[in-house]
Image: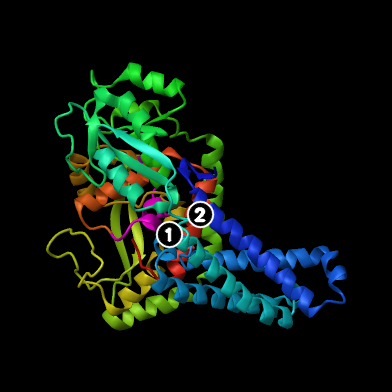
Amino acid sequence: MPRIGSHQVPARTLLLIGVDSVACACILIFATALRLSTSLRTEIDDGAYWARIVLVVAVCETSLYFNDLYDFLVVRRRTDLFARMTQAVGAACVVLSIIYFLAPTASLGRGITVLASPLILAFLLGWRLSANATNLLARGNERILIVGTGDAGVSLVKHILGHPEYNMKVVGFLDEKGRDIGKSLVNPKIIGATADLQEIVQAEKVDRVILALRERRGGTPLRELLQLKFAGVGVEDVHNCFERLSGRIALEHLSPSWLILSDGFKKSPWLRACKRVIDILASSVLLILSIPILPLVALAVYVESGTPIFFRQTRVGYRGREFELIKFRSMVQDAEKDGPQWASRQDSRVTKVGKFIRKARLDELPQLFNVLRGEMSLVGPRPERPVFCTMLEKKIPYFNLRHSARPGLTGWAQVRFRYGSTIDDSKDKLELDLFYLKNPSLVVDCAILFETIKVVLLRRGAH
């Protein structure tokens, strides 16, 4: 099954993408047959025709993704489904119109587009509604048993319950000492003791056992697990499973030995060199493209609240080295006269211009100079201030590990987490940062940049 790093892409998501792509292509061919029945054979034999089909399918898939139609909470909510599907198809038509205006030879023809558009909308909407009605996207097949009552196991079950696309059914927990049988940690409840592991696996027809023991030393049923493993039952550590499903590394009861012995955290010289070359080229191109925008943003900041136009702040970077981060100022002057404090989503210190440039991510553009200087990368953990780093290192285990890579303009935590302004938020973001550090690759970086484009276009604001 495809993965982004070690994060597994759900089979149900792949099913949606595959059916959408094939359906769009077939509808386009059908519309071509209706419109050009006499010359259909000539069109099909033309390689350029298939390239045009691929273009339309790619634009449609991108529009569906940007409208969250591969988010299963949206797919299952009928109130949002119709509106988002209409927006997605409409946006795809607008983008294709612009492409056809700039490159007329890429067009399939207006008649084909007029015929295909409502058919694509009707099919994609009907396909999702029928999939929901038949529980195709929600039925659980793989039966999961959680051995232990550790916090990481509870977090994993909550995550599974919120994602029906994983196609998993949690049958229950096993208590280490068998004292709390019947107690509900999260639905489902504790159904037995670890001493009854084999009997419960057989009775519940369990496919996979997840180890989430509070204390493993002397409490792990090694012999029973070994027998189950050789009998074909999957056995997996809770941290490996949580990472595979959620794209984050749970900090609850995470031992240094797991970090040391697990696969990942490999930073080859080739990867570092490629990232640096990409950083230099991309930041240079983006700075050139933003030349018309930079003076306008600077003028807007100056007109509303005067100088300084730029906001400079010390941040902690690669290997703990401090550097000066540059942004357009989005807060009032002397915003921290009472001392350092976290910014929040509804921060009263943010100016009117600041709200806009934060939403559009325009305040981040000067950080491209930090990227050029090698202090930052396009993708990586966001840099934190020294005072907060000192505090968080004392309160959150492994926090200093995020300094093992260059900080980024955007990152895995930024595109997968809301605006964070508390210690608990910082812990959640660290779990995502650790996943990124464990799975360094250009594929993961490309996925993050693609998701960042989605965040910027939908104006979901900075994280």
Closer to us: 89 or 406: 89
Above or below 106: residue 399: above
Q: Residue at x 29, y 75 (%)?
A: 307
Above or below 66: residue 209: above
Disc 2 secondary structure class: helix
Numbered marks: total: 2
Per the rendered image, the range of residues in magenta is 403-419
Expressed as whole percent of the image width and height from the top left, the position of residue 208 reads 40, 33
Q: Identify which amino acid the numbered label 2 is placed on.
A: Thr
Quadrant of residue 223 within the rendered picture? top left
Q: Which residue is mark 2?
A: 13
Quadrant of residue 455 within the rendered picture? bottom left
Disc 1 secondary structure class: helix
Expressed as whole percent of the image width and height from the top left, the position of residue 13 reads 51, 54
Residue furthest left in the image? 338
Quadrant of residue 184 within the rendered picture? top left
Q: Identify which amino acid the numbered label 1 is placed on.
A: Phe
Residue furthest front in the image? 203
* Sequence-first disc among 2 and 1: 2
Residue 410 visible in the displayed image: yes
Tell me, yes or no, whether the highlighted magenta stretch contains residue 406. yes
Circle 1 crowding by C-alpha within 10 Å: few under 14, some 14–19, many from 20: some
Q: Which residue is mark 1?
A: 72
Marks 2 and 1 close (CB-CB < 8 Å): yes
Q: Quadrant of the C terminus?
A: bottom left
Expressed as whole percent of the image width and height from the top left, the position of residue 176 reads 21, 27
Closer to us: 305 or 121: 121
Q: CA distance from mark 2 to mark 1?
A: 8 Å
Q: Residue at x 37, y 44 (%)?
A: 169
Q: Quadrant of the N terminus?
A: top right
Circle 2 crowding by C-alpha within 10 Å: few under 14, some 14–19, many from 20: some
* In this rendering, position of residue 324 left or right of residue 409: left
